[in-house]
Amino acid sequence: MRFTVEDIDTSEVARRKALYGPLTEVVRELIDATIRTEVDDDTIREVHAQVRAATDRLRARQSDGPFGVRFTNDGDGMAWGNAVIGLRNAIAPPLTIARDPDGTHRSQFVLGAAYEGPPGLVHGGICALVLDQILGMTALAGDKPSFTGTLTLRFRRSTPLGPLRAQARVDRVEGVKTFVVGSLSDADGVTVEAEGVFILPAWARE
Ligand SMILES: CCCCCCCCCCCCCC(=O)SCCNC(=O)CCNC(=O)[C@H](O)C(C)(C)COP(=O)(O)OP(=O)(O)OC[C@H]1O[C@@H](n2cnc3c(N)ncnc32)[C@H](O)[C@@H]1OP(=O)(O)O
């Protein structure tokens, strides 16, 4: 499992954020533009060649696998490949998840054309993805890993593409199991309710 430590300081983390964040953002925009463009065929072929060339340039030197979750010596986490919050992941919406003093986690975000399931609506698997992440981060205690054991969703009504909110809180802790509840909402209220059991795996227990 790729939890690693990188010997870099806060200023280097900031430099990399400033470098990679805008690249990811423009690729994210490219995904949306690819879905929604109505330009002529020749333009599509030209852009195809340009994107191919840009991809080949990035591949000239790359890591031999996924990004993993990296920590600095100061304990700052860099989950930059993460599918929901990853700074370097253009398929991540991305979510910024804030923690209230009482431990509740919240996020406001926008899901656009790339997350569609039924027409105009968020794909159910994307609802699960977002909720797994926010519930999972809520379950984390200190530096202990926590894995989704069971995630139960109730889709109360369809979730429209557009501005959304998610929240989660710990319901109870029983030994190595943390029970978390949460929801996804649009402007009219809750669309999906979630309950998750997150488990400290045997290999991480003392
Ligand atoms: C910025 C940096 C920060 C980092 C951010 C990174 C993102 C982080 C956020 C991540 C967000 C996304 C998160 C993700 O995407 S996590 C990825 C998706 N999840 C997985 O891949 C998990 C795969 N499964 C496992 O690894 C193990 O089976 C787990 C860890 C689940 C159990 O482990 P282990 O086999 O060692 O457990 P045990 O046998 O000792 O049992 C212990 C207790 O647990 C109970 N139990 C067992 N299985 C289940 C189950 N499935 N549901 C409910 N309960 C279950 C069992 O009855 C017992 O209870 P009791 O009898 O004691 O009462």
Image (tube, rainbow, N blue to C red):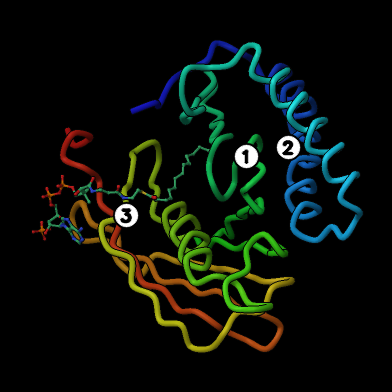
Mark 3, residue position: 148
Please, what secondary structure does the residue beneath circle 2 have? helix
Among numbered discs 3 and 1, the one appearing first in the sequence? 1
Query: In this figure, what is the number of numbered marks?
Result: 3
Q: CA distance from mark 3 to mark 2?
A: 27 Å
Q: Quadrant of the N terminus?
A: top left
Give the quadrant of residue 201.
Answer: top left
Give the quadrant of residue 111.
Answer: bottom right
How many residues crowd around disc 2 within 10 Å: few (fewer than 14), some, or many (20 or more)? some
Q: CA distance from mark 1 to mark 2?
A: 6 Å
Q: CA distance from mark 3 to mark 1?
A: 21 Å
Report the residue at 34% width, 40% height from top: 145
State yes or no: Cβ of the residue under disc 2 lies below 8 Å from any atom of ligand 1: no
Mark 2, residue position: 24
Q: Evaluate if marks 1 and 2 touch, with contact meaning CB atoms under 8 Å apart.
A: yes
Mark seen at residue 182 = none
Q: Quadrant of the C terminus?
A: top left
Amino acid on which the number 1 mark rests in the picture:
Asn
Of residues 22 and 199, the one drawn nearer to the viewer in this rendering: 22
State yes or no: Cβ of the residue under disc 3 lies below 8 Å from any atom of ligand 1: yes
Among numbered discs 3 and 2, the one appearing first in the sequence? 2
Question: Residue 162: image x %, image y %?
Answer: 73, 72
Mark seen at residue 89 = 1
Marks 3, 1: nearer the viewer: 1
Amino acid on which the number 2 mark rests in the picture:
Thr
Question: Residue 13: image x %, image y %?
Answer: 68, 23
Amino acid on which the number 3 mark rests in the picture:
Thr
Report the residue at 40% width, 48% height from top: 140
Question: Residue 100: image x %, image y %?
Answer: 59, 60
Answer with left or right where residue 54 lies relative to residue 88: right
How many residues crowd around disc 1 within 10 Å: few (fewer than 14), some, or many (20 or more)? many
